[in-house]
Image (cartoon, helix red, strand yellow):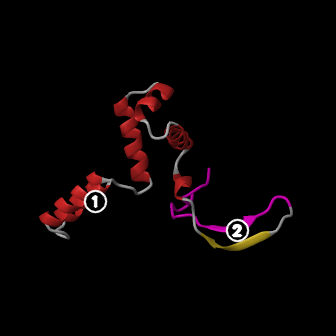
Amino acid sequence: MIITNCPRCGGEMKVVELRCPECGISISGEFEGCPFCQLDKGEAEFLKAFLGCEGNISRLGQVLKISYPKIKRELDLILKKLDLTPVEEDVLDALEKGKISVDTAVELLKKRRRR
């Protein structure tokens, strides 16, 4: 697990060095972080199981022996942590803020449902 926040001030930590354990070479710079590295071990294991079940929530419930509502809650928490929201929420949020019209929102939601 990678530390994503500074233990002293709470600021965001940045990856600035990569090192090869075989030959010892180091490369310094500012590297893009992994969004999945911010998940704790339990969340990462849950996501791994979800992918192993190919996204089949019923199968995941059987494998992990947990209920559908608990699975949905865990998925929602992980999505929020990764700053991912369903398209419907984005469309409704844009509509609420007046960024798009009702007609545009309806069209976007219809397109989403056709996929």
Residue drawn at x 45%, y 30% as measured from the top left: 59
Query: Does residue 106 belong to the magenta stretch?
Result: no
Secondary structure mostly seen in the magenta stretch: loop
- x and y percent of residue 86 in the render? 33, 53
Quadrant assignment, res 33: bottom right
Q: Secondary structure at mark 1?
A: helix
The kind of residue on which mark 2 rests is Glu
Q: Are marks 2 and 1 in contact (CB under 8 Å)?
A: no
Is 87 displayed left or right of 106 in the figure?
A: right
Q: Dot 2 corresponds to which residue?
A: 17
Q: Which mark is residue 111?
A: none
Residue drawn at x 52%, y 64% as measured from the top left: 12
Residue drawn at x 54%, y 44% as measured from the top left: 44
Q: Residue furthest left?
A: 102
- x and y percent of residue 52 in the render? 54, 38
The residue nearer to you, when weighing 13 against 34, is 34
Please report the bounds of the magenta region as a residue range. 1-22
Q: Secondary structure at mark 2?
A: strand
Q: Residue furthest right?
A: 23
Q: Please rate how many residues cluster around mark 2, counting C-alpha atoms within 10 Å: few if below 14, some from 14 to 19, many from 20.
A: few
Where 50 falls versus 103 (above or below)?
above
Is 35 displayed left or right of 61 in the figure?
A: right
The kind of residue on which mark 1 rests is Asp
- Give how far apart the Cα atoms at labels 2 and 1 are: 36 Å
Q: Residue furthest bottom?
A: 29
- x and y percent of residue 66 in the render? 43, 27
The residue nearer to you, when weighing 52 against 89, is 52
Q: Dot 1 corresponds to which residue?
A: 90
